[in-house]
Amino acid sequence: MTGGIRAVAAVDLGATSGRVMIGRVGPGTLELELVSRFPNGPVEGPDGLHWDFDALYEHVLEGLAEAVRREPAIESIGIDSWAVDYGLLRDDELLAQPFHYRDERTERGVAEVHEIVPFDELYARNGLQFLPFNTLYQYRVDARLADADTALLIPDLLAHLLTGARVAERTNASTTGLLGVRSGEWDTELAERLGIPAAVLPDLVDPGTVIGVLRPEIAERIGRELPVIAVGSHDTASAVVAVPLSSPNAAYISCGTWGLVGVELHEPVLTDAAREANFTHELGVDSRYRFLHNVTGLWLLSETVRAWEAEDAAAIDLPDLLAAASAVTGDIPLFDANDPSLSTPGDMPARIAAVLRGQGAPVPEERAAFARMIVESIAEAFADAVQTAAELSGRIIDSIHLVGGGSLNRLLCQATADRSGIPVLAGPVEATALGNVLVQARALGAASATIEDLRSLVARTHPPLRFDPRRDCNH
């Protein structure tokens, strides 16, 4: 390519959709071109909720082939996805379609794991917040694990199919619950205590490592022989690389289906207070800690809209709905966005109404008011998590960077600023894909070495939109 601009392909997989993008990086240049977008979601099988991984892999291959067709100068491929879910291999055969993290079997896994290793000991070892779908709970109740020779998280499984290599990228491995929070290595003693054979845990690699080159038959299909480079393969790890943090005291919210709310640290905060607040220590790129809390994000709104569309047998225009929600005045009831009853698919409006009735609050009748209530409740949960992150880390938060799809939701951005009393800097929308691209570019020698330099490039090329707290709000 001309002008010192280099190109890479980013595979970015979320819990509701995936995309393949071309990234172009150069001095003063950081661009994304969407090549393909495809749906992703749970499918019901005879033994529970799974991902349609075969379809996902086919979409990825088609997207990469189209990316190379459009941009023959692509030099590498990077893959990120949601966390915790995995595929089991035996002699290169996938034993089953990977389970979906919302499958109900994880409840039994939690009970069994905590009976063997109390949660306070788990937290001291892995630094992870309690989430009922963390991988170690899934492994505990997966009958097929005994038949497997390797367990690979979703991005590593895709990299294996592309290259033949079997590795675990550290940022995503840290979400399994089996990585030592201080060592960054597999806690094999913990695994064996839980009946998880340590032999299934592959070698660990850091972001920026070349995992391998495309198998010949894959290279032929895609149109080029390319290396696959490990990025921050947990999508939040990639997103945080591309958060243009305005100061060391800035918080971030990576908002899509989930809202990941936290700060970046260089040392863990393994206190009783952090454990009780359910704050996690997921590894970031360059051994940073993503000290954060999972808050239910736009899942609540998207599931509600999906239910209304089914009721109407017609599509709902989300921007119109949010515009109407913004115009709603008067008192808005709030509910706990993290209420466990709201964590699985199905008739979200009725479930939210049940939560409201349970707390003696009125249920908005108009859809615009109902949507406004959802957004304000998410914003309230975000504000609470930012305050808790500040208290636990000893930081005085001076700004909140909200990235991901939620940064397009102006109502959510303003509500978060109002409820936290802290300016919100919104964008970039495609932070995850940008972080994926930047780590690849750095590995290729096409971008600066430090994360701070990478973030400066993001700030210059994707300046955020600022939302100041409104003084007339009584939150």
Image (cartoon, helix red, strand yellow):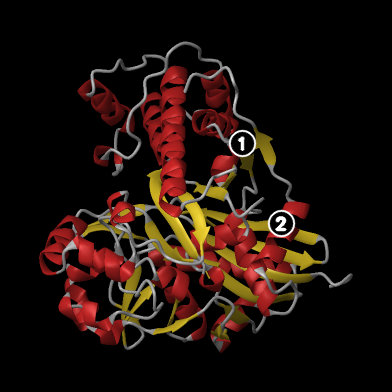
Residue 465 is left or right of residue 165, and the answer is: right
Tag 1, which secondary structure? loop
Q: Quick one: which residue is furthest to the right in this view?
A: 3
Q: Could you tell me the amino acid type at mark 2?
A: Val
Q: Is residue 326 left or right of residue 147?
A: right
Residues under numbered marks 2 and 1 in contact, where contact means CB atoms less than 8 Å apart? no
For numbered disc 2, what is the local secondary structure? helix
Residue type, label 1: Pro
Q: Residue 253 at what x, y percent from top left?
A: 52, 47
Looking at the image, residue 148 lies above or below residue 428: below
Which numbered tag is attached to residue 423? 1
Q: Which mark is residue 436?
A: none
Nearer the N terminus, badge 2 or badge 1? Answer: 1
Picture coordinates of residue 426, whole percent (x, y): 63, 42
Q: Can you identify the residue that label 2 sits on? A: 458
For the question of whether residue 259 can be seen, the reply is: no
Measure how far apart labels 2 and 1 are at the Cα level: 19 Å
Q: Is residue 338 left or right of residue 454?
A: left
Q: At x 38% / y 81%, what residue is drawn?
A: 185
Relative to the observer, which residue lies in front, 178 or 60?
A: 178
Q: Nearer the viewer, residue 372 or 424?
A: 424
Q: Is residue 326 above or below residue 295?
A: above
In the image, 105 versus 26, the foreground residue is: 26
In which quadrant of the rendered view does residue 189 lie? bottom left
Q: Write the residue at 30% across / 73% down.
A: 178
Residue positioned 28% across, 64% down in the render: 123
Q: Residue 312 versus residue 268: which sits nearer the camera?
A: 268
